[in-house]
Amino acid sequence: MFEQSQKRFFSVVLVLVLLISLFSSVTASAQEVVPYGIPNPEYPGTTIAMEPGDVLYSSKSLGGSSPIVGHVGIVGTDFRVYHVNPVAENGVTGGKSDDITTYRNRHASGQTITIYKLRAGASYATNAANWAKVNYSRVTNYSIPIYSWEDFKLSTINPNYCSKFLWQAFYYGNNRTDYVTGYWTDSKEVVVPPYMFADSSVFAFSGTFTRP
């Protein structure tokens, strides 16, 4: 009887020792784990960090002459640049997804690309970035308003052009709230010029980078 009690006692002690040892090991491991943040990539030749929702503006259109001079793209949540241009790739014009080097190299040598950030806040910019990432592939035909009345409608996703696509990203990405002009809706029929993003007080100038 006494021996059985002793055995039970030592069994309980052994279990407690094992539990304490396990808890100490887990606590030590937790203290050793130091979270390291992964920094955002930087724009080529700069120390400016890329952020989702950044608007990239250049004064010359991509893909040749265009009645709308200028071009804009938006940085996605994956740090790729989403934009719409007339360059045919695989037989299709329209939406493009580029890494930052490819996007820069679409410009002529010496051309400057200007970075703008939405003053309303990072969450609204991120919403626009995600919308552009999800929807760029829906644009399979580049077209500007002089060619079709449908192109004037801000609700038309395809066909599309660069600056209207960006307006849509900020608008639809933020529950149909116009963070670009403050008062447009998608029922409006209007041309969205690329320089609107550069001239707007709701976007802050954040720096430039250049195509070598």
Image (cartoon, rainbow, N blue to C red):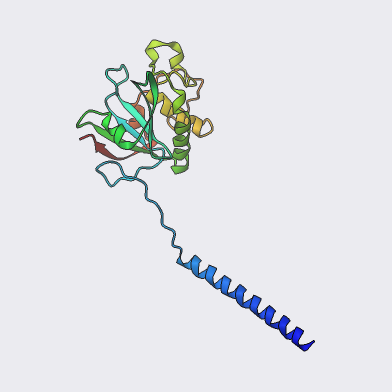
Q: Nearer the viewer, residue 26 or 141?
A: 26
Q: Nearer the viewer, residue 120 or 63?
A: 63
Residue at screen point 50% across, 23% down: 186
Residue at screen point 72% across, 83% down: 7
Q: Is residue 170 visible?
A: no
Res. 129 image quadrant:
top left
- Against 156, residue 77 (above or below) is below
Location of the N terminus (image quadrant): bottom right
Res. 99 image quadrant:
top left
Is 20 on the left-hand or right-hand side of 48? right
Res. 160 image quadrant:
top left
Q: Is residue 56 visible?
A: yes
Q: Position of residue 9 (x, y in %)?
A: 71, 83
- Against 120, residue 87 (above or below) is above
In this view, which residue lies farthest toward the right?
1
Residue at screen point 48% across, 37% down: 127
Q: Position of residue 55 (x, y in %)?
A: 36, 35
Q: Position of residue 77 (x, y in %)?
A: 43, 40
- Against 81, residue 37 (above or below) is below
